[in-house]
Structures are given as structure tokens and as C-alpha cells.
Amino acid sequence: MAGMLTPEQMQELSATRGIEFDKLFLKAMIEHHLGANEMVANLSSASAVREQSTVFEFAEEVDIDQTIEKQRMLEILEGIK
């Protein structure tokens, strides 16, 4: 599934400390949020979802929230030197 860490990536994250952990974690979470955006895009392309307004509205909210959080994490990552 898009945006999910592999067992190897989880091990690497678990073994990392300090600023390097922060960077690795943020990069992983950004990918995770991109995966959520991809899932919403796939879901939104289904005509059955568009017909069920509650599900479609929820999917749009998830997409917006994930995009905002992704941008925040990119800004934090840029600030880490």
C-alpha cells in the first residue's frame, strides 16, 4: 500500500536517533500522507463514491487535511539542518 513503511524502513527508523531520526520520520510521514492522497484520488475517481455524498465529502476532507499536514512537515524538514 502506498505510503506504508517496509519492515526494513521501520527497523532503520527504530535504530536512528536525534536529528537523523527526525528527518527520517518526517520523510516517512510525508510519503505516508502522499499515499493517503493517492488513495483519496483513487476513491474519488469511482462514480459510486461521488454518488454517496457523505463518503465523497469525507474523502475530500482527508485529502485537504493530508495535504496541509504534508506541507507542515516539509516546512519542518526544511528547518532541520
Image (tube, helix red, strand yellow):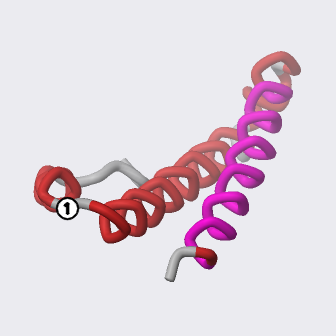
Question: Where does the image place residue 44, in percent across and percent down from the top left?
Answer: 73, 41
* Mark 1 nearby-residue class (10 Å; few <14, some 14–19, many ≥20): some
Please check the rendered image and state whether residue 60 is part of the magenta-colored stretch, yes or no.
yes
Side (left or right) of 28 relative to 66: left
Question: Where does the image place residue 29, in percent across and percent down from the top left?
Answer: 47, 54
In the figure, 41 relative to 57: above or below? below
Question: Where does the image place residue 24, in percent across and percent down from the top left?
Answer: 35, 66
Q: For the residue labelled by badge 1, is the local secondary structure a helix, a strand or a loop? A: loop
Question: Where does the image place residue 67, in percent across and percent down from the top left?
Answer: 73, 54
Front residue of this view, candidates 77 and 43: 77
In the figure, 7 relative to 56: above or below? below
Residue at the image position 56 percent from the left and 71 percent from the top: 77
Front residue of this view, candidates 17 and 7: 17
Side (left or right) of 11 relative to 1: left
Magenta region: 56-78
In the figure, 53 relative to 4: above or below? above
Q: Splitting the image into 4 quarters, where does residue 48 fall?
A: top right
Side (left or right) of 63 relative to 12: right
Q: Amino acid at mark 1?
A: Thr
Front residue of this view, candidates 47 and 62: 62
Side (left or right) of 79 relative to 11: right
Q: Which residue is mark 1?
A: 16
In the figure, 53 relative to 36: above or below? above
Residue at the image position 81 percent from the left and 38 percent from the top: 60
State the predominant SS element of the stretch in magenta. Answer: helix
- Residue with the most extreme bottom position: 81
Residue at the image position 57 percent from the left and 46 percent from the top: 36
Residue at the image position 63 percent from the left and 68 percent from the top: 74
